[in-house]
Image (spheres, rainbow, N blue to C red):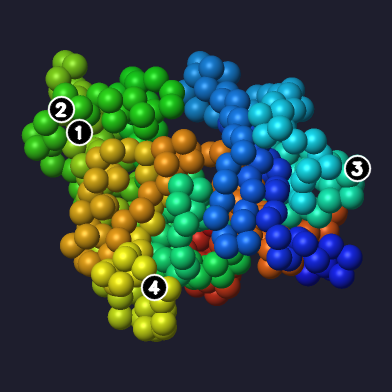
């Protein structure tokens, strides 16, 4: 549960710089980071440590939740210690501790959240439970100052959605996948091609030598005019074609076709959202002065692990520029899961006085726009809540 913080005895937290420890354990990276947020909203990453579990899961071709959770338990103490050392701080130099509370593999989420609770209790610090997706949403602000509002395409292994972002806790869903995420399609097709784990980067590398024009892959939801995505048909068709590939060149050609098809669908839906958002009330309000604000209709941000794919990034940048929008993606280090984005989201929440109760529970499902997820669901809500 979230509540407003009491700043009566600590007014500096509301007006001065904020230094926050962030913890991220929602999937297969154990990460800790210390971020300082200035009163003007500029973020400085003092440290960012990520322990990857790729080697632990490679033999299985994907993340095994039990193995991931056990690794988080074993690694988190050392990862946090290293992050604090690299930041040159002790716990008395922190203003708060932020931890991912969902969505994700709940066994892993519990590890980071429990560690954050322990630090908060032991040091008398505010606890900020952060939505992992909100971390991705603000991650572009780790590279440079970014004003709200902006249009966000959040595209990762488990999520694919378009959102209007007005600030932390203020996001409206414009479109989402009705089945698989783009990153999941990358990984599953890579596995069908016999590539290693993680599949997305391996498929991108293979596609460099390919010519995708020889394959005709299906295009989903062409008759619909909304901004929703679908990748299940593409995933199935490509997996079947992979069984017919007999040479390395054929596999490279298919990889290029898949990458192009995914980038095209992301661009088509983003194009619709940009056109709709350009006419919305959000962009008719007075906007901050500055070159980007003065010469473009607005800002289009692409975040999440798939934003690290160079073809996807270039295609979406072209879509933004065609519609008169500035384009921004986080630095490569902050596209995939990391704790700096969690620390920044936590600091922004702390600045607004939004902190969490110590009994906050880990959530396997946690939509950014809970109203839309409950009232206009693309998936029927299950006993664990609405999907993201």
Q: Which residue is mark 2?
A: 210
Say whether disc 4 or disc 3 marks the residue closer to the N-terminus. Answer: 3
Q: Residue at x 56, y 38 (%)?
A: 338
What's the distance in space between the residues labelled 2 and 4, CA to CA?
44 Å
Q: Residue at x 53, y 39 (%)?
A: 337
With respect to residue 182, does 191 lie above or below?
A: above
Closer mark to the observer between disc 3 and disc 2: 3
What crowding class fits label 1: few (fewer than 14 Cα within 10 Å), some (14-19), or many (20 or more)? many
Is the N terminus in the top left, top right, bottom left or bottom right quadrant? bottom right
Relative side of 223 to 384, left or right: left
Q: Which residue is mark 4?
A: 289
**Marks 1 and 2: in contact by CB < 8 Å?**
yes
Say whether disc 2 or disc 1 marks the residue closer to the N-terminus. Answer: 2
Closer mark to the observer between disc 4 and disc 1: 4
With respect to residue 326, does 51 lie above or below?
A: above
Q: Quadrant location of residue 4?
A: bottom right
Q: Which residue is mark 3?
A: 122
What's the distance in space between the residues labelled 4 and 1, CA to CA?
41 Å
Q: Classify mark 4: helix, strand or loop.
A: loop
What's the distance in space between the residues labelled 2 and 1, CA to CA?
5 Å
């Amino acid at each position: 549960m979230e509540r407003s913080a009491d700043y009566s005895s600590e007014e500096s937290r509301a007006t001065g710089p904020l230094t926050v420890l962030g913890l991220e354990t929602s999937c297969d990276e154990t990460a800790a980071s210390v971020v300082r947020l200035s009163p003007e909203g500029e973020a400085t990453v003092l440290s960012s440590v990520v322990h990857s579990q790729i080697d632990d899961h490679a033999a299985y071709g994907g993340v095994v939740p039990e193995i991931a959770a056990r690794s988080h338990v074993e690694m988190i103490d050392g990862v946090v210690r290293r992050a604090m050392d690299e930041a040159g701080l002790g716990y008395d130099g922190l203003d708060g501790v932020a931890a991912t509370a969902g969505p994700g593999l709940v066994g892993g989420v519990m590890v980071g959240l429990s560690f954050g609770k322990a630090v908060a209790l032991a040091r008398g610090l505010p606890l900020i439970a952060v939505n992992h997706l909100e971390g991705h949403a603000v991650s572009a602000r780790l590279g440079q100052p970014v004003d709200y509002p902006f249009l966000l395409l959040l595209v990762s292994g488990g999520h694919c959605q378009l959102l209007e972002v007005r600030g932390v806790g203020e996001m409206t869903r414009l479109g989402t996948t009705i089945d698989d995420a783009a990153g999941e399609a990358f990984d599953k097709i890579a596995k069908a091609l016999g590539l290693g784990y993680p599949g997305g980067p391996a498929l991108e590398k293979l596609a460099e030598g390919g010519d995708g024009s020889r394959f005709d892959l299906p295009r989903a939801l062409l008759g619909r005019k909304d901004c929703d995505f679908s990748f299940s048909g593409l995933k199935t068709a490509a997996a079947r074609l992979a069984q017919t590939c007999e040479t390395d060149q054929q596999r490279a050609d298919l990889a290029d076709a898949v990458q192009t098809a995914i980038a095209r669908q992301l661009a088509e839906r983003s194009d619709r959202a940009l056109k709709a958002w350009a006419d919305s009330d959000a962009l008719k309000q007075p906007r901050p002065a500055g070159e980007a604000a003065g010469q473009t209709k607005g800002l289009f941000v692409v975040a999440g692990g798939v934003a690290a794919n160079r073809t996807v990034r270039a295609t979406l940048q072209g879509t933004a520029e065609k519609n008169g929008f500035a384009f921004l993606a986080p630095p490569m280090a902050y596209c995939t899961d990391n704790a700096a984005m969690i620390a920044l989201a936590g600091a922004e929440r702390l600045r607004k006085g939004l902190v969490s109760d110590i009994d906050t529970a880990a959530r396997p499902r946690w939509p950014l726009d809970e109203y839309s997820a409950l009232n206009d669901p693309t998936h029927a809500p299950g006993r664990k809540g609405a999907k993201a």
